[in-house]
Image: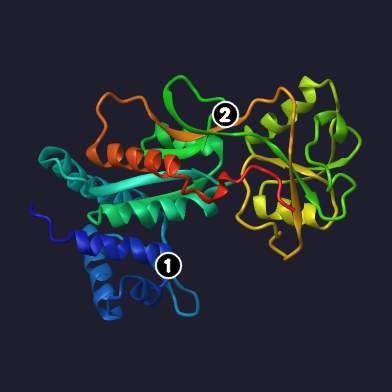
Amino acid sequence: MPFRYTLRQLEYFVAVGKAGSISAASEVLNVSSPSISAAINQLEAEFGLDLFVREHARGLSLTKAGHKFLERTEFVLREVELLSTLAGDITGKVQGILSVGCLVTFAQIVLPGLRRGFEELYPDVRIEQRELNQADIFSQLRRAELDIALTYDLDIPADLKFLPLLDLPPYVVLYEGHPFAQRETLSISDLKDSPMVLLDLPYSSDYFLSFFRQADIKPNVAERTSDMSVMRSLVANGYGFSIANVRPLNNLSPDGKKLIFVPLTGDLRPMKFGLLKARIENETNTMAAFIDHCKTTVEAGNLPFLQTTSTS
């Protein structure tokens, strides 16, 4: 029996499922609400299922069947888009979809610029970006939900391949009035009794705390947060120092207070910033082009977080 629905109707279904209403999906898709409503009705008639519960005050919510259909439909649409990537490999063109993950600690200052530069070079590529912690990056690469990710070399599993791009040594983040704010460098022993704001993310926190274990010092962890911006604001408001390997272009916390960045000295392993991917023999043309773009951008010094020295 031939299919009586189209890929466009499936796209409309996914948009409504994510937006929660036809009007919201209409704005996202720039398609009229009646057209989307008709597509949803036709899909429900074709499958003989109610995909949504209609609630006048709250819009549309997915039924149990609708949730299952949404998950599978997203997979189907992604596979369809990957046909374009396959065609590019056959013809030698760089095109199709590329799913790129990025470690959440530096995604806001790295990924948008890299993405824009790449898409300007290759307008036939559409990048899907995701901001994730290290554990989720590993998981999504293994499930092929990501093609490649920008991250650190933190406990990389043997089944994934890391391509190093840059070494980033650690530095101490301080508020302007901190007793150590005028120091040119600091060591772990200097921080022994000072309260610490720990950036508490999978694998990242272990890396920062390893400095103290190596020196046989117990850190005075006063605050924990998984958000880089919150960490900077806590430091700027005097809740303690923190340790990081990347920094924004300016010295202000999100709430406008000044931060001081002092290099951390000693026999400390720097973070290696790079690309992580599955161990596959044949890369797509699109992935190979993205890897080359990242290497070229780093070599040209065009990533904003490459400032690792103290400025006051």
Residue 53 location in percent, x, y?
A: 41, 68
Q: Secondary structure at mark 1?
A: helix
Pointer 1: what residue? 19
Image: 67 above or below 144: below
Which residue lies at the image location 24% right of the left edge and 76% below the top edge?
35
Which residue lies at the image location 84% right of the left edge and 20% below the top edge?
216
Residue 60 location in percent, x, y?
A: 42, 70
Q: Quadrant of residue 214?
A: top right
Q: Is residue 27 visible?
A: yes
Between residues 297 and 80, which one lies in front from this camera angle?
297
The 10 Å Cα crowd at callout 1, few under 14, some 14 to 19, many 20 or more, is some
Q: How is the image coloured?
A: rainbow
Which residue lies at the image location 79% right of the left edge and 27% below the top edge?
212
Mark 2 belongs to which amino acid? Leu
The 10 Å Cα crowd at callout 2, few under 14, some 14 to 19, many 20 or more, is some
Q: Quadrant of residue 265?
A: top right
Left or right: where 300 falls relative to 155: left
Which mark's residue is nearer the viewer, 2 or 1?
Answer: 2
Q: Is residue 61 visible?
A: no
Say whether disc 2 or disc 1 marks the residue closer to the N-terminus.
1
Pointer 2: what residue? 154
Q: Secondary structure at mark 2?
A: loop
**Mark 2 and mark 1: Cα distance apart in space:** 36 Å
Q: Mark 2 near mark 1, Cβ–Cβ under 8 Å?
A: no
Residue 51 location in percent, x, y?
A: 34, 62
